[in-house]
Image (cartoon, rainbow, N blue to C red):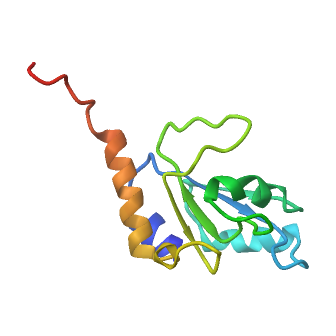
Amino acid sequence: MVHKYVMKAIDDPNLRLLTVWGPMLGPEKQPDAEAATALLPDPRVTHFWSDGHEVAEILRPAAGLPAGERAWDTFQLYAPGERWGETPPTPDFVMHVDKLLPADRRLDGAVLAERIRALLAARAAPPPTPSGR
């Protein structure tokens, strides 16, 4: 869905997708993740492998997930130029697959693409000028 609605549909060189693959269901190994990268064959996508759940745990609070829930199958959008510190910043928008988050945030490719286009457009827009000048 992300390939179809986002990567194929949004031809913007500023778009970047960071994908973290890991043992979500337990038996997955790095070769499984390497094979899955074929699902997102775009040079703007950077693939990572994590053999544990550390990344999913680190992203959990920023995504608004309750304790005990991991941030896998979440789609977290950050404005271009967002700076990360020791903890992730709060995403501008979050979508999910079957998480304890609002139903209106369930993954919808068209909505995800719309939100991404809005963030990219905001980056491209010239800064506002002071009124009266």
Towards the viewer: 106 or 35? 106
Left of 126 or right of it: where is 80?
right
Q: Is residue 110 visible?
A: yes
Q: Of all residues shown, which one is farthest toward the top?
A: 133
Looking at the picture, does residue 115 appear above or below residue 119?
A: below
* Residue 35 at x, y percent in the picture: 75, 73
Q: Is residue 8 visible?
A: no
* Residue 79 at x, y percent in the picture: 47, 45
Left of 39 or right of it: where is 104?
left
Q: Of all residues shown, which one is farthest toward the left?
A: 132
Q: Residue at x 55, y 51 (%)?
A: 91
* Picture quadrant where residue 86 is located: top right
Looking at the picture, does residue 98 appear above or below residue 19?
A: below
* Residue 70 at x, y percent in the picture: 76, 67
* Picture quadrant where residue 20 is located: bottom right
* Residue 83 at x, y percent in the picture: 58, 35
* Picture quadrant where residue 112 is located: bottom left
Q: Residue at x 34, y 54 (%)?
A: 118
Q: Of all residues shown, which one is farthest toward the front?
A: 66
Looking at the picture, does residue 111 appear above or below residue 13?
A: below
Q: Residue at x 91, y 79 (%)?
A: 27
Left of 57 or right of it: where is 126?
left
